[in-house]
Image (cartoon, helix red, strand yellow):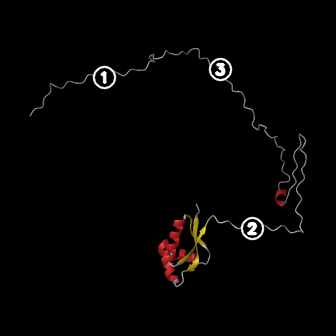
Amino acid sequence: MPRYEIAFAGQLVSGAQLDAVKANLAKLFQADAARIALLFSGRRMVIKNNLDEAGAEKYRSILLRAGALVEVRDMAEDIEEIELAPPPAGEAPEPLPVFTPPVPAGQRLKVLPRDEYMAAFAEVDAPDFGIAPLGDDLQDEKPATQVPPLDLSQFSLAPTGSDMGEIKAPPAAAPLDISHLKLQE
């Protein structure tokens, strides 16, 4: 389903007065004069986007009655592709660094700086971590879990449904008999 945007570039309907159109737009958008002045800067400003066809037509007709000419544009239009120019022929790119073989065990990797910024890190002592072969597990092995020595021989299980020694609630007291009491007049 195509989506549309409404854009305004400060163009007026023929015969419309600028002050009247500004007043109409200020009333429609409930905006102050400074915001309305931005709409009339001459630049294309998107007022509303992501509208369906009916909504876009509604906006266009309302703004047309207010005296503003707007552009309704399909948002899915192809964007012009720009091809970059090739680099100048006279300049040769900097050569890429040459791959050096792995550093023998016990020695440190020596890194050559590629520019002035990286030259500040030339004297950093960096270990050669290397790259693990494809599919290797990089996590350390988990140590075996040690079961703590517990002596549970002193405990036993009670049979199902047995009384576990819960404290019993006291029996409910018998209701008081107040049938012998009378009110005096």
**Residue 3, how many percent across, how many down?**
58, 63
Classify 22 as above or below 168: below
At 80% from the left and 40% from the top, the residue drawn is: 134
Instruction: Tell me which amino acid carries mark 3.
Output: Pro
**Label 2 crowd bin: few (<14), some (14–19), many (20+), radius 10 Å:** few
Q: Is residue 166 left or right of residue 156?
A: left
The percent coordinates of residue 110 (x first, y second) are 88, 49
Q: Secondary structure at mark 3?
A: loop
Please say whether residue 27 is visible from this viewpoint.
yes
State the mark number for residue 149.
3
Q: Left or right? Give the position of 178 relative to 135.
A: left
Location of mark 2 (residue): 82
The numbered mark, 1 or 3, whose residue comes first in the sequence reads 3
Helix, strand or loop for disc 1: loop
Mark 3 or 2: the one toward you:
2
Q: Nearer the viewer, residue 15 or 172?
A: 15
Q: Looking at this view, is 149 or 86 the one in front? A: 86
From the viewer's perspective, is 1 left or right of 102? left
Residue at 57%, 79% (x, y): give it.
11
In x, y percent, where is residue 85? Answer: 81, 68
The residue under the point 72% across, 29% down is 143
Residue that badge 1 annotates:
172
Residue 146 placement, left or right of 178: right
Q: Look at label 2 and name its amino acid.
A: Ile
Q: Toward which corner of the image does residue 39 lie, by quadrant?
A: bottom right
Q: Choose the circle earlier in sequence order: 3 or 2.
A: 2
Which mark is drawn over residue 143?
none
Q: Nearer the viewer, residue 9 or 69?
A: 69
Residue kind at label 1, given as amino acid type: Ala
